[in-house]
């Protein structure tokens, strides 16, 4: 039959909301008393079977024209029942596909999470209105937004995916929409009633994920990492983070990290290809429960402020396996990270980064000369000690570095350390030592550090005090004999380094390791001897300022 001989069919159904084109054509076939073979002939015409290969994906123009002639629908209505409805990143990109060239499908598949052969099914939806939804074909959607149940993808009777027959555009049993209709090596297609499929209810958080995904796919703007983004950007970022989490969850060390990881790793063990290498970005797990769980994990991360999201992602970074190429290279080879995700992953791998960003954004709290190397004990205990579990000494150093990070021009922890007089690389080491043993949120830390800075005296110049103590260390002949005669007649000259260190610690609030009294980098025996010296000088440390007062001769 030539195209000009095609006429409007006697009965033309109205497309249902969200109905897929193949399901619509099956209703048209049934209502007009046609067979699958007859409808296929009407669609194919003289071109042969190849013209309907992309029927549900991106049909060729000639097939669309024939459907228009048969049904009276317009082109927009017809293409809205195909996956072209989800083009332009919502969530697919179909521009690479030329429906006349089968190999062009490979280019589209490379974008990742491209709809596989067949479709998913919600048994409750089928029981409700017998309509096969178009969005069921998207692997991005593991849960029915209307009923809150997981989609099913395989018929329990014939063991095949629903509508996975590439050779036939329409399923068997066109008169019965709820029957499976897959070919099953007999003349009679599979007769399993899909309304009998189990309806596995998803968790509340997973249902929220399904709702958010449906909103984004409809083109609504979404909230992501402190800002409002387009639906396309939201979907892409969520998919890429989910891909990274899948690769991390595939590691044996992640088995006990989350409940869904057990199901995921069981799925991996059941597949012939095992962990499959870096391919979760191309095709996600077939199990909708795993997809629902990992997408929910990703959503909960991305809907937090950036700093809190980095902290939540940090435990996942522990599962990156050891590699000679480094953590960053391992991640980059398994997920295509957007700029926002790249920064998030970097912050999660180096926990000091996210706090540093907040401190820099906060602005200067104290002048650099008013920040000591060691924060005095009383204000530290009041404002920060309960939030930092790394110990008092490390915590007081870390607090000083945090205040230094708010100074304009200080861009790294090492620069903050250098500004306070710590040796090269000590700043980064101190920050990591504190942060890796601290679970407090970065926002709470930043607020506590700001309160701590407000409690310090901005008129004290600790750099000047450090300079004075260095002068005492360099010119002991100008003050030590007189000072000893007045305060400690029995003190030996060998105790002078410990006395200088006390002045450094108490008057300049300097770190023990940077005391000018040490002729070479201090070692544990010298520190032990210093503490013994302090203990001998006074049983009560609070009276040391009276017992060992700093000389004023050089001031």
Image: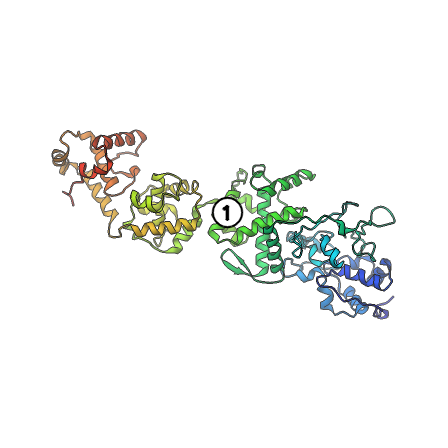
Q: Is residue 541 left or right of residue 62?
A: left
Q: Name the residue carrying label 1.
A: 312
Give above or below for 538 relative to 509.
above
Q: Secondary structure at mark 1?
A: helix
Quadrant of the rendered structure where residue 37 is? bottom right
Few, some or many residues within 10 Å of mark 1 (<14, 14–19, 20+): some
For the N terminus, which image quadrant? bottom right
Count of numbered circles in the view: 1
Closer to us: 544 or 47: 544
Percent of width and height locating residue 21? 75, 61
Closer to us: 349 or 376: 376
Percent of width and height locating residue 46? 85, 62
Asked whether the viewer can see residue 89, the reply is no
Q: Is residue 113 left or right of residue 381?
A: right
For the C terminus, which image quadrant? top left
Percent of width and height locating residue 45? 84, 63
Percent of width and height locating residue 354? 44, 50
Closer to us: 385 or 91: 385
Give above or below for 35 relative to 506.
below
Q: Residue at x 66, y 41 (%)?
A: 267
Q: Is residue 5 left or right of residue 503?
A: right
Asked whether the viewer can see residue 52, the reply is yes
Closer to us: 393 or 259: 259
Q: Residue at x 48, y 44 (%)?
A: 349
Say how the picture is coloured: rainbow
């Amino acid at each position: 039959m030539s195209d000009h001989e095609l006429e409007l069919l006697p009965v033309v159904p109205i497309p249902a909301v969200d109905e897929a084109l193949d399901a619509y054509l099956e209703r048209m076939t049934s209502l007009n008393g046609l067979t699958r073979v007859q409808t296929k002939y009407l669609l194919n015409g003289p071109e042969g079977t190849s013209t309907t290969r992309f029927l549900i994906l991106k049909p060729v123009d000639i097939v669309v024209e024939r459907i228009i002639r048969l049904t009276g629908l317009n082109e927009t209505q017809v293409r809205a029942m195909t996956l072209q409805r989800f083009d332009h990143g919502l969530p697919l990109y179909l521009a690479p596909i030329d429906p006349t060239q089968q190999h062009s499908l490979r280019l589209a598949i490379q974008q990742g999470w491209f709809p596989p052969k067949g479709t998913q099914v919600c048994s409750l939806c089928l029981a409700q209105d017998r309509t096969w939804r178009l969005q069921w074909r998207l692997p991005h959607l593991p849960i029915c937004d209307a009923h809150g149940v997981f989609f099913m993808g395989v018929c329990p009777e014939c063991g095949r995916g629903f509508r996975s027959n590439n050779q036939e555009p329409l399923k068997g049993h066109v008169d019965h929409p709820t029957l499976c209709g897959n070919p099953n090596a007999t003349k009679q297609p599979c007769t399993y009633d899909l309304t009998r499929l189990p309806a596995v209810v998803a968790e509340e958080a997973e249902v929220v994920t399904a709702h958010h995904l449906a909103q984004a796919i409809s083109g609504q703007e979404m909230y992501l990492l402190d800002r409002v983004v387009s639906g396309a950007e939201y979907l892409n970022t969520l998919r890429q983070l989910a891909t990274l989490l899948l690769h991390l969850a595939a590691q044996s060390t992640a088995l006990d990290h989350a409940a869904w990881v057990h199901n995921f790793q069981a799925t991996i063990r059941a597949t012939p290809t095992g962990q499959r290498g870096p391919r979760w970005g191309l095709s996600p797990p077939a199990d909708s429960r795993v997809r629902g769980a990992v997408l929910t994990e990703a959503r909960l991360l991305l809907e937090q402020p950036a700093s809190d999201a980095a902290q939540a992602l940090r435990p996942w970074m522990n599962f990156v396996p050891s590699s000679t190429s480094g953590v960053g290279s391992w991640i980059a080879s398994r997920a295509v990270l957007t700029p926002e995700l790249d920064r998030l992953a970097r912050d999660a791998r180096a926990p000091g980064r996210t706090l540093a960003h907040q401190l820099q954004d906060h602005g200067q709290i104290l002048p650099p000369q008013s920040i000591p190397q060691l924060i005095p004990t009383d204000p530290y205990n009041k404002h920060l000690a309960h939030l930092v579990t790394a110990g008092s000494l490390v915590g007081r150093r870390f607090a000083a570095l945090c205040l230094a990070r708010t100074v304009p021009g200080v861009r790294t922890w090492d620069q903050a350390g250098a500004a306070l007089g710590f040796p090269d690389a000590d700043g980064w080491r101190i920050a990591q030592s504190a942060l890796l043993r601290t679970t407090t949120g970065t926002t709470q830390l930043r607020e506590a550090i700001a309160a701590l800075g407000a409690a310090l005296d901005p008129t004290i110049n600790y750099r000047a005090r450090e300079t004075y103590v260095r002068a005492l260390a360099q010119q002991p002949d100008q003050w030590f004999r007189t000072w000893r005669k007045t305060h400690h007649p029995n003190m030996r000259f060998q105790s002078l380094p410990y006395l200088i260190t006390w002045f450094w610690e108490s008057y300049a609030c300097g770190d023990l390791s940077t005391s000018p009294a040490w002729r070479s980098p201090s070692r544990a025996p010298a520190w032990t001897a210093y503490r013994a010296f302090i203990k001998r000088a006074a049983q009560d440390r609070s009276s040391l300022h009276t017992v060992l007062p700093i000389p004023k001769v050089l001031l």
